[in-house]
Image: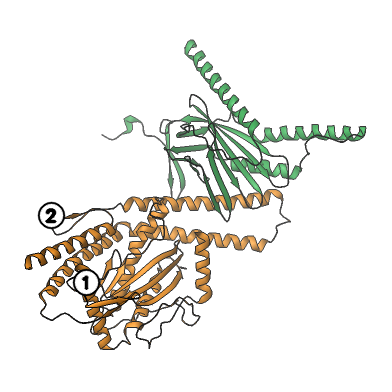
Amino acid sequence: MLISGSLGQYVTARTLATLCVIVGLCGCGASTTPQQRVADTPVADFSGHWEVDYARSDSVQTQLNSTFRDIQRQARRQRDAAERGVTYQGPPLGDVDTILALAKMAELVTASDLLVVHQDIAFVRIDRENSFALVCDIRDGQTSATQLGQETCWWDGQQLHFYIELPEGLSIRHRFVRSADGALLAQRTRLSTRGTQRDFEVSRIFARFEPGNRGYQCIDTLSRGRVCSTERAISDTPL
Amino acid sequence: MMRLAAIALALLWGSGCATQPDAGSRTAGPQNEQSMESPWEGEVLRVANRPSAPALDVGVVLFDPGVDAKDDSPTAAVRRLESKLLAGQLRDALVASNQWGVVRMVPVTSTLMPVNIRSQIIKSDGRDLVLQVNAIDAAGTVVFDHLIGHRETVAGEGFSVLFNAISNRLLQWWQPQEARDRASLLSLAEVRYAQQLSPDAFLGLAEESDGKWELQRLPADNDPMMRRVDRIRNQEYLFCDTVDEQYVALWERAGGTYALWRDAGREQAYWLDAYEARVRARGDRSDDSRYARMQAEYAAYRSYRMQEQAWFELAKALDGETQPSVIETADRVVTLEGTLDVQYETWRRLLRDIFAAEQGLEK
């Protein structure tokens, strides 16, 4: 047991390490206006059922606290620079109202705890609980534009990108990356808005699960919405 | 495409949608100009006790779906389905008017019928249906050419008003015609059909100049070749009956899902209108907090996408219910396969071959 436990911890640690490296890399490459780059490399298999792993995911509040600490540090540096009579060279502080709004939006946009990914050679469809599905033609990317917003997606060889731009300037960028062993899926979401330099980013880690092995089953009904019930034990099955 | 449709709709409602053929004229010309005088809305089907003699047989060409043939998206599949279902509804309206002889659905414009009604779907989203419709007779005269549209405001209201209008416009052209002109057109149609089977055998009976056909002379009443033509024509009618049967089967299979698709599309279109009205009413929303503005904008986008995806799922379901089927004719030897257009062309080629073979035997 001890051996298998250690192995399990090792595998989890390795998975996390891989994921962190990849997520870290994508963090570095992030920019407010993404450059669409369709890669020739085959798309990783994202298909399956995924549930959020809260322990590994960012909390919006923690991210917000971190952002504010960063702003405080910058404000201090700005004040010190002013007292010394030199020009402050750092990034702009950003509008606190906007950062708060983006943080609250991040909470809303990443609210789905369950993802179901359907994938074939041409399409990826990420069904998100209580939200619209993210759909991508992975052969050559895809742009769909409506009066209410524009959506672009592409596979860059490592990550699956979805970029949503709304008319009044809010943009949402989701990037999905899968761990090497296929057990974890990272969703990195960056929100930005026109007129502010500071984006807000939050990561959610999803773990793969097999539906139907959890002792309960849920179905969507017209009259009562989502209804969950415990699964019938084998001994309950009528003869 | 959306922009095109929007332009078409604007044009349509802005103009009152209708052109009124000159009831007094015996050969109507193409009429693309829009008139404010007789809107289509509220058009009641003009029903007769019996068709006036000689009765005019009408061909309803399956609608041009207005999508690229290579487009395999579910939305395009719905359009293709509609091209048959709407043609069937137009056929039903013409039959219900009791003004015509036999009304048949044909895959393509055919000399089989003295007049063909051709329609293209310009826009169809469950709420708005915009069609470009024209009718052309055996002489090559465009009887009418209209851009017509209707907005469905109540579930189940349907688009019968458009089909009523088409039947009524055809009647406005046909009714004032002299009996002699009517008979002449029907004879011309027969001759043109015969010429299409064997151009050499019926050379000179009808001649074409600048796209217009004119009857030069009639074949003898006891012409045995014309009797064979009649027999072949009856064989072609059999094919049209198969198209009719397909339509009935298609309606039974997919009619319910199609109605759901239309309901969902209409609800989505009205929701979008209501949303835009709310946004306009709010003005610049400068009093709202940043978050309230962002949240409202995202909520609108999310709702729209969710509805759109539900609609798309319905379209996929419809696509699954309308897979092409193989038709077997009464002929035990020949089995026609492929799309209706292809089957029809195969069938007509076969009939031409039969006719040529019979002629050879006769000789």
- Mark 1 is on which residue type? Gln
The label nearer to you, 1 versus 2, is 1
Question: In the image, is B204 to the left or to the right of B301?
Answer: left
Residue B333: image tag:
2
In the picture as drawn, the residue positioned furthest to the left comes out as B362
Percent of width and height locating residue A157: 53, 32
**Residue annotated with mark 1:** B195
Task: Answer yes or no: is residue A58 visible.
Answer: no
**Which chain is tinted orange?**
B
Can marks 1 and 2 be said to lie on one chain?
yes
Whole-percent x and y of residue B232? 16, 68
Question: In which quadrant of the rendered view does residue A192 lie?
Answer: top right
Camera-side residue: B287 or A193? A193
Element under disc 1: helix
Please name the residue shown 78% across and 39% down the image. A93
Three-letter amino acid code of the residue under disc 2: Val
Q: Which chain is green?
A: A
Q: Is residue A61 left or right of residue A188?
A: right
User: Where's the C terminus of chain A, which quadrant?
Assistant: top left
Which element type, helix, strand or loop, lies under badge 2?
Answer: loop
Q: Residues within 10 Å of mark 2 (few under 14, many from 20)?
A: few
- Image spot of residue B34 (x, y percent): 49, 77
Between B127 and B146, the residue placed more toward the observer is B146
